[in-house]
Image (cartoon, grey):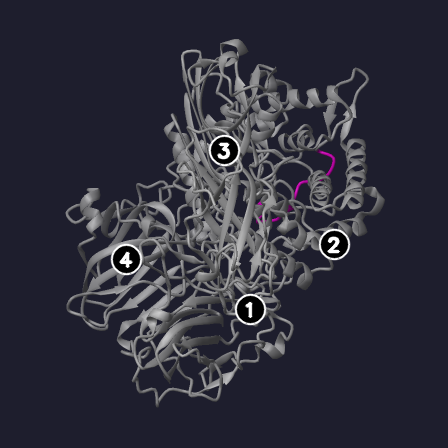
Amino acid sequence: MNTQENFTKINNLKVEGSHNPLGIDAEYPRFSWMMESDLQRQRQKQTAYRILVASSPSKLTERDADLWDSTKVISDISVAIKYNGNILEPSTKYYWTVIVWNQDDIPIQTEENAYFETGLKSTDGITRWDGAKWISMKGKDVNSNGSPLFRKETKLKGTVKSARLYISALGVYDAYINGEKLGTVTEDDKSLEIDFMPPGWTNYDATIHYMTYDVTNYIKEDAVTLAAALGNGWWNGRISKGNEKHGETTYYSGEENELALFAKLFITYDDGSIHTVVTDTQSDWKATDTGPIRSNDIYDGEEYDATMEIPGWNKNDFDDSTWMNVKEHDYTKIFPHAKVKAFNGEKTQFIEKLNRLPQSITFYTGVIKQEASKNGRGVIDVDSTRTILDTERAKKSDVSITDQDTVIFDLGQNMVGVPNITVQGEKGSQIKLRFTEMLNDDSEGADGPEGSIYTASLRSAKVTDYYTLKGNVGGETYKPTFTFHGFRYIEVTVVSPNTTIHVKSLIGKVIMSALQQTGNITTSHPSVNQLFSNILWGHRGNYLWVPTDCPQRDERVGWSGDTQLFANTALYNMDAAIFLENWIDMLKDSQNIYGNGTFHSASPGGRFSDFFGVVGNSGWADAGIIVPWTVWQMTGDTTIIEENYDAMAKFIDWIYKQTGDTYRGPGSIGDWLNFQGTATQLMSDAYYAYDAKLMMQMALAIGRQTEAQRYKNLFESIKQEFIKNYIKVNESGKLTLKSSNGSAFDLTNFYNSAPVEDNSQCALLWSLKLGLYKNEDQKQQMINLLVENIKNDKKYKTSHPDSNRVNYAENTLSVGFLGVNVIAPILSEVGHSEVAYSLLLQDQMPSWLYSVKNGATTVWERWNSYSLEDGFGDVGMNSFNHYAYGAIAEWMYKYMAGISPDVERPGFKHIHLQPNIDPEKRLTSVSGEYKSVYGIIKSEWNIKGNTLHYHVSIPANTTATVWLPTSDVNKIKINGEPIEDYSKINDIDFKNGKAMIQIESGHYQLESIY
């Protein structure tokens, strides 16, 4: 074989989306890799590959590969290549590599040592579990909220060669082996990554996940003790409680769901013999609920009494003779068809690099100035002698707190996680920690004196942790285990009277599903940069096992509308494809459990499955189609289509059964939280059309031409009915889009949508997005109506005196959830990026920068969640960490930075580099980066005078079309040369003020007079 060229490497080898994963149960795992090349060497590409899979490193050769040799495959694809070799055995480690041939037919072999390991390869919870049972504590007092502890000690039979733990829980677990907390050792720096509240959330009546851990290095003695503490999690927490209006959860039984542990420890000795330890009722498993975690709930917090800690309970040689026995949980009897599946993807973990330290520490001892304050609540009486405003001093958090003090730690960033607090004090003394996103002002919406923590928006969630000290002289550290919070501020008080507690340190520990960040944007505009940071932090906080709406109040559920509209942004920000695949599995489970074919408003769980009786809620239920399409477009992998096609088709058929040949949607709550009303039925009809269009494309992608034609015909029928129902043209040819033709969605005493209006922004946007018009004249009229609506100048307000738009500033948006990810992209698509920039850079309400101007560090639920002028918004729905409106980042990546996939060649195999420049030069530079499945794409532009300087990098094995704004194609320079002299470019076109230049991989510096 020829030696590898030193400027091209094959790296980033993955199986099922992960590097060297454990517990893979897919029958045909997907392989992928990247071709990395010195970008100064252009046109590098793959022309063929050969995958080898073997049972040992010594057999991983072209001659000896004993599992699979794909042989040389002529292909330039390096994503989602499915295994096609011998049957993979359970609990077995396999080794693999890939050889790639480049454009010169030179073979290049990876330098990585790649492997993957299968899990138990069963889903029934019986096969290969060696008799493991779901076990619960026997004799547990129903009035005890203490977290149950389980343990079993087993003598070993030899020298351990390897050990794997397969583990799950009804509830969540915190597991130990020989006293060491279970985690995953990273391959790069050998640090221990701790999972947070595994195994996460699913529809437990259909699916529950088990986790796989390599625990070989945990077993260092002649015995092994497997131990675990269990928390309520989602299985037995208020989060799963539903009601008749919103939908009930079938697995939930009124906060009386008994917790259970399910595990198998699989040990291989040096002599090849096998030893298993499983959870059962016959082998001396013991349990107690007398440990330190006295209560726990996702909404309400955790109570931890360190005086009740049981030293050595999770280690060898502990005397558990006074502990209770265990019993078999009735889970398998209640849900006999539930699947126990290996978890595939990134688990929720502590992200150490994102830890937050206090930026200030405020002490106060009472309230003053009640009579002088606007709302009569007064102002906190700040103790300026102890308050710390210096950031460097505050970070050390070295303060003493008495029972007369209230102390607020400001971490400077709204985040999701838990506190890590180190304290010193007398045994039995107790502290209370409360968490909030905002501090009170003096407005009517405040719920306390100015400067105190604002908690009204948390609704019924108590969001409070209690810690009772054990009295260690050197201090003791508390970090909650079975709850999490969304917060920027932590209020610390001493509960015990006549007591002083020394706080030695306090850290905000960030948790999230540990997805790799793949995208980044920086600009010349500080507020836009802050907005992008806010979007990232909101994304981090709301991707926690499942995509949630908010992380702080008594909600935190997997709303499907939020998920679908943010999915494209999510896939730019992070490597989220497998995460979204997992959630689609849950949505599909919900379809089977709670409906007769429709997808639902939220998943997992039945809560909000049908929001206020709106079954098949358009804009939400359609996530079952939109998310698979979006994942496919961003990755080029059709697996998510293939695995969910029947469920998607079932949903489309369900809609047709509801509305038949009227070709109307099934109903919707509409453009949620909008500032200009659009009829809910119009939104439902538009999403029905969108579903049909996406189904046509996905059917074609997997070779179902006949069905693609059926969906094409369905789209045309919906389109014609849409035009008939909503487009009116008068005798002079003037078009009106009758978005008032229907009603708004109103809920008395909860939410009132803005009044419906004709030619609303959201209706125009969706009509333009889907081509729901008769001809180009109608399209242009819609464009004009949209631009006039957004500009909202004096002339517009004068001619529309009854419009809700008269109440707001020029160049503001009026869309809610269902228009927010559409508005800026459509403006750019129809040639009005200047209006998109005016919207982006507007800081009047409603706009994206309005929250930034008002001090936000995450994206808000409402455009007007808070203002310096008016204070807090409606407490019924007022989250300060809701990622939905962060979907503007999709436009920032695709059009502002200009990094966009090609719909015809998904997955960035072909890239559109289409920077849209702000013509008013309010923003003069943008740097965008995205790590696609083929490698890192960079797009950087800046303006100097009338010259655009544009630097691009596209990864090996891809091609791109550059859409370069220019007034004279002959004045374009590439890498310092006039374009006509640049020998490596031979395909150039010019259209609508842009040069279209076809390029291959490499780095390019372009200049253009525009």
Mark 3 or mark 4, which has the lower sequence index? 3
Q: Is residue 636 left or right of residue 148?
A: right
State yes or no: discs 3 and 2 in contact (Cβ < 8 Å). Answer: no
On the image, the x and y values in percent for residue 811 come to 52, 24
Q: Amino acid at mark 4?
A: Val
Q: What element does badge 1 sit on? A: loop
The three-letter amino acid code for the residue at tag 1 is Glu
Closer to the camera: disc 2 or disc 4? Answer: 2
Name the residue type under label 3: Gln
- Vertical relation: 864 (above or below) 428: above
The residue where tag 2 is placed is 650
**What is the spatial separation of the Cα atoms under label 1 and label 3, in whole angstroms?**
37 Å
Is residue 233 in sight in this rendering?
yes
Badge 2 or badge 4: first in the primary sequence: 4
The label number, if any, that marks residue 492 in the structure image: 4
Indicate which disc, 3 or 2, sits on the residue closer to the N terminus: 3
